[in-house]
Image: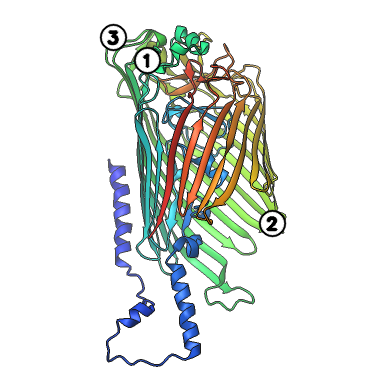
Amino acid sequence: MQKLAYVLFFIIIHFHGFGQDKPEETAPLQTQDALKTQPKDSLVIPATPKAQKKASLLDKILKEDEDPEKAKIEAYLIISHENDTTYVDTTLTIQKDYKYNYLRRDNFGLIPFANIGQTYNSLTYNFNTTNVLPSFGARARHFNYMEVNDIFYYNVPTPLTELLYKTAFEQGQLLDSFFTVNTSPQFNFSIAYKGLRSLGQYQHTLTSTGNFRFTTNYKTKNERYRVRGHIVTQDLTNQENGGLQEDDIANFESGEEEFLDRPIFDPNFENAENILEGKRFYLDHSFSVYNKTVKKENSKEANDTISRHELRLAHTMSFEDKEYQYDQSAPSDLFGEAFVNTGLRDRVTLEHFYNKLDVHYAHKALGQFNINVSNNTYNYGYDRIVVLNNETITNRLKGEVYGVGGSYRKQYKGFNLQGQAGVNVAGDFDANFIKGEASIQLNNATFAKATISHNSNAPNFNTLLYQSDYRNFNWQNNFNNVETQQLGVQIKYKKLAHISADYSVISDYVYFGSTENTIAPQQIQAFQNDETINYLRVKAENEITVGKFALNNTILYQNVEDEANVLNVPEVTTRHTFYFSSELFKKAMFLQTGVTLNYFTKFYLNAYNPVLAEFYVQNEREFGDFPRFDFFINAKIRQTRIFLKAEHFNSSFTGFDFFSAPGVPYRDFTIRFGLVWNFFL
């Protein structure tokens, strides 16, 4: 509570400072309607032809300003955690169709469960990471959990609102509402909430989730001091049923008409749910101690300057509180013996307090340097001690970690060079990382980038310590760090080719697996692989356009050298969209319609465990090799994008062998619709 009070005190102090800085007063422009309201005794000068021409031009500019999307859409800025800046995009493209889902990002490489808001099974993995502290765990619940890098900041000339709506399964809907405004050119805040409730087509799969976000950013008029922060609260609740029983799996695959009514299937249980909750308070601010600027060469603009060299001090502070809980009214034989006969409850929490001090130095000739020191305070664990087989399993992993790091960036002969590194110098967890990147924009059409990275980090907290009312789900491990090295390249040429490839070497990989090497019963534990894993990914994307028709393709090839078979991925994953685009009704509407095919080859698909909210390795049965066809009609009217999709319309005639995980069927044919609507005030 002291740390939380410290965070709130800092935020209040900074916000109080905002209120003391009055924006500059500017005289408003006067339109002709405003001039008509002048007092009758005002001096009126007859307009000359030249003055009338200027007034006409002014009227034209003012009318354009009445439509902010048409006149100033580039002024509605979106700023990432890494300070990469884009602007609001209200166009309708095929990429917008790919991102119109629960996660609101392209989910290629993921296969969702039957109900919206449930978890996703992974078809690919990326081992490029800079973590220096173990993650919380319950990773199957984190696909929609918004981390620090998922939060954006804004700077807008007028208030901006965005509303998203999408139908769910059976009962419920998905809503995401967002509003941001600049109260002055220096101060912006935004508030947003994404809520979901969906009953689902199978018994006991109801989902109910909420993500609340509040952000703010401020800079002084001379831009020497900058501050931004956010508050995020999240609760992600899922009913769990353990998947279909073995007899009903056979009935599902038969495709007989009597089994097409999905609620008739008997799941393994109907008395459990899990929930992930989180609260985060984040603040970073910086002050420019010294900044020497000069005017750009051959520039006549007073504000057109560049920084020759600058010294900036920065401070980042974050407090996050997470809680994962699994509730079940009575134990299930699927998970083995339990300590109690009723009212099972597994609850684990993590308190994480993070502080970092940075010194930034930028020089036009030398580049940008950063040196930082950081402190992580963590408190992970339970409110009890477990004694099992005469061994005591502790209840807490608690301590502090101190680290140092740095980064460098430089533009050199057309190349953008970047590098960063970090190491823990004190504390209970050893970790280090180094990452380098070089990219070049060869011309307006061609872009190339190469990356190299190394990371050594402790595995997730729930692999090191876990307690449960189920006897087999209690452990305390002393695993080695997971070591990863990755080399990656990207080449992009317009829309014709975007090729990316990476090669990873993973040592001491930590994973969840069954003690019996079977899908059921699910007696799961954490293991560490002693063998080295070599993992290659090659991804190719392109779009071929002929007139109003286009074919968008994404193909991912993967190859794993792994003697223990603990990292399982499909060899080929593809997505192909053939679509038609055209403007209709005198360009009042823009229409896109087409068909999308998703497919992946057979492999040992990971199974899902609801007690841990984790996926685990199984090598008993292969899944995949089933196509998924979606037909869509999308339209754009002004700033509104409308989406209508017939999902998996081939489900009834290409075989009922579609699964998202062992025992968990993928979605049947369904029609869903929704919209995204932007308001510019």
Which sits in the foreground, 167 or 281?
167
Q: Residue at x 72, y 54 (%)?
A: 442
Query: Rounded to the nearest whole Å, what is the CA distance between mark 2 and mark 1?
Result: 63 Å
Q: Give the labeled residue for mark 1.
A: 392
**What's the residue type where badge 2 is placed?**
Asn
Disc 2 packing (10 Å; few <14; some 14–19; many ≥20): few
Q: Residue at x 44, y 70 (%)?
A: 63
**SS at mark 2?**
loop
Q: Residue at x 59, y 37 (%)?
A: 128
Q: Residue at x 44, y 64 (%)?
A: 67
**What's the residue type where badge 1 is placed?**
Thr
Q: Give the labeled residue for mark 2.
A: 444
Pick whichever of labels 2 and 1 is earlier in the sequence: 1
**Total tally of numbered discs in the picture:** 3
Query: Rounded to the nearest whole Å, what is the CA distance between mark 3 and mark 1?
Result: 22 Å
- Residue 135 appears at what percent x and percent y? 46, 32
Task: Name the disc covering residue 341, or none.
Answer: 3
